[in-house]
Amino acid sequence: MAFLRKENKKGKTYLSICESYRDINGKTNRRVLHNLGNVECLGEESLQRIAKQLLSLTHTEFQEVETEELERVNYGYVMVLSMLLQTYQLTYFFRRKSRQHKLSYQLIHPVLLMLCDRINDPISKLGSHRVQTEYFGLASIELHHLYRSLDYLSLYNDAIQTQIYQHNRNLFNYELDVVFFDVTTFYFDSDVVKEGELRQLGFGKDGKVGKTQIVFSLLIDKHKMPIGFEIFNGKQFEGHTFENALKALKEKYTIGKVIVVADSGMMSKKNIAYFEQEGMAQTYEYIVGDRLKVLPHKIKEKLTQKENYTTTIEVGPDGEESPLKICVVEHENKKIIGTWSAKREAKDKNDRETRVAKAKQLLQTPDQLKKKAKNYYLKTTNKIDYELDQSRILEDEKYDGYKAISTNTKEISMEMVLDQYRHLYQIEHSFRTFKSFLEARPMFHWTDERIKGHLVMCYMALVMLRFMEQKTGLTENEIRRSLSKMQMSKVKSGNNTFWLRAKQTPQMEKFIKDLNLKPLPNTISEVAIKNYIPAVL
C-alpha cells in the first residue's frame, strides 16, 4: 500500500511517496517510490498541484477545504505558573484548604488566574474576571471567588511564606547566611481612613504626605530570592519594623547564624540593642548604614580626614571598577567603616548646589518658605524673614563623599562587609519590581484581609519571577515577552478541529527547555492538548 511520508532532517521537512510490502520472510518493509523533495522549496502551490494530480489518478475531484480560526489563546502563563505552583507544592496546599473550608470552588483556580494577570498585565480583580478566557487551561471563575480567595491568602499568609522558603532552600540548595532588609510604603489614592487598622495617614517613602498608606518590609537573600515580608499600619516608623521582621524570621524558620544587611534608616540604639540580647546575638550579626553626622565627635573627626584612609578598589553593580578609600574605627563592640569616593563627593556637591539654587529661588516666593525652608538651607532671622544658612552649608560640605557603615561581624573581612552592603541595591530592585512591574498599587481594596491577601498574591508573583530569572537567565521583561508570545489558535479545517501553535523564537525554545517543560508540537488535537496543559489543575 502506498502512502505519503514526511521526514525531518537537520531542521528541514522532506516528502516522499512510499510503499509498504512484505519480503520473502513475511516481514513488513517499505520502499521509496518517488522523492518529492524539501517542503519549503516546493511551496504551497506546488504541493496543491501534486495533490490534484494524485487525486486525478483515482478519478476523485480535488476539493478546497475551508479553514477557520475559531479562537486564539495564551497557553504560556498557565503552563508555566501551574508548573511552579506544583513545584512549590502550593497546588496541593490550596486543594487541601479548599476541602478544609468546604468551598464550592478550588482556591487554586482564582489564585492561578491572579498570578497570570499579575505577571502578564497587572489589572484589577474585575479586570481579571473579564479576561480569563484569554488563557487556555483555566476553569471558569466567578468574580466573587476572586475576592473571597484574597481572604484565604491573608489567613494563610505565614503558611504560604514558610512553604515557599522551605522549598526554595531545597530547590536551590543553599544555606541562609546573609539577608537584606528594607521597608517601603504603598499609598492609597483615597485620603479617607477606611475600616481596619492597616490604612493610616503617614509619611511615604516616596515623599507622599497626607496619604493613607501601609508600611511593607521585605527580606531577600543574596540570590535576590524573597525570604519573607511583614505588613504594618501606615503610621508605623520604618525603624520600628526591623525588630518585628527579624523576630518573625527567627520564629518561622529554622536558621543558623545570619548577617542582616540594612540601610541607615534601621540604625537606632534600640535596634542595635536588639542584636545584643540573649539569644539574638547567637543568631544575628549586622551590617547597617550609619549616620556619620550624629556619631561621637572624635569618631566623626577621624572619619572625615582623608589622611586616615587607605585605598581599595570598588566594583559597582554594573561591574565598573573605581577607587574607594576606607577607614575603620572600633566603637562600642562594633566596627564603624568610613568610606570616601570622588564620584560620591561630586554627587554630594551637585546635590547641595541644587538645593542652594532652589533656596535662592524660594526666597523670591515668601508664601512657600515656611513649609520648605528647612529642606533648602534656609533659616529665619526674625520669625518672618529668611536667609541662606551659610554655617549649615559649610558644615554639610565637610561630609562630601563620605559614608559610614557599622557592623559587629567578626569572621569576614572589611572588603566583604562593603561588598555585602553594596548588594542592598538588590532589595531596592525588588521594591521596583513590586511597584512597577507587578504594579502592587493601586490596590482597589479597603479591608485589612483583602489588602494582606493582595500583597500575598504579589509576593507569590515575585517569587515565581525570581525562580524563572534564576533558571533561564532572562530579565523580567524578557520573561513577560516569552510568556506572552506562547499562543495557539483553535482551527477548524473541514470536519476536523485542532490547535495550531504560534511559531516559537529561539529564546522561547530555550526558555521552555530551561524550565524543563514539555514543548507543544506545531499542531495538536483537542484530546492530546490535555497531556501538556491540564484543563483543570
Image: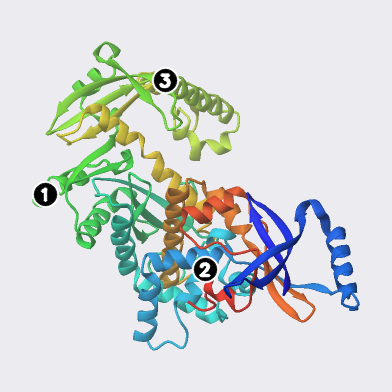
- The correct choice, above or below, for 256 with respect to 198 in the image is above
- The correct choice, above or below, for 307 with respect to 274 in the image is above
Quadrant in which the N terminus is drawn = bottom right
Relative image position of residue 258 (x, y in whole percent): 21, 46
Outermost residue to the front: 24
* Residue depicted at x 57% and y 38%: 367
Q: Quadrant of residue 480?
A: bottom right
Left or right placement of residue 440 versus residue 20 in this view = left
Q: Which mark is residue 114?
A: 2
Element at label 1: loop
422 or 139: nearer the viewer: 139
Asked which colour scheme the image uses, the reply is rainbow
Foreground mark, 2 or 1, reads 2
* Residue depicted at x 73% and y 79%: 496
Label 1 vs 3, first from the N-terminus: 1
| Residue picked out by circle 1 | 277
Q: Categorize mark 2 by other alpha carbons within 10 Å: few (<14), some (14-19), many (20+).
A: many
Q: Categorize mark 3 by other alpha carbons within 10 Å: few (<14), some (14-19), many (20+).
A: some
Label 2 vs 3, first from the N-terminus: 2
Q: Which mark is residue 24?
A: none
Q: Which mark is residue 345?
A: 3
Element at label 3: helix
Foreground mark, 2 or 3, reads 2
Q: Amino acid at mark 1?
A: Gln
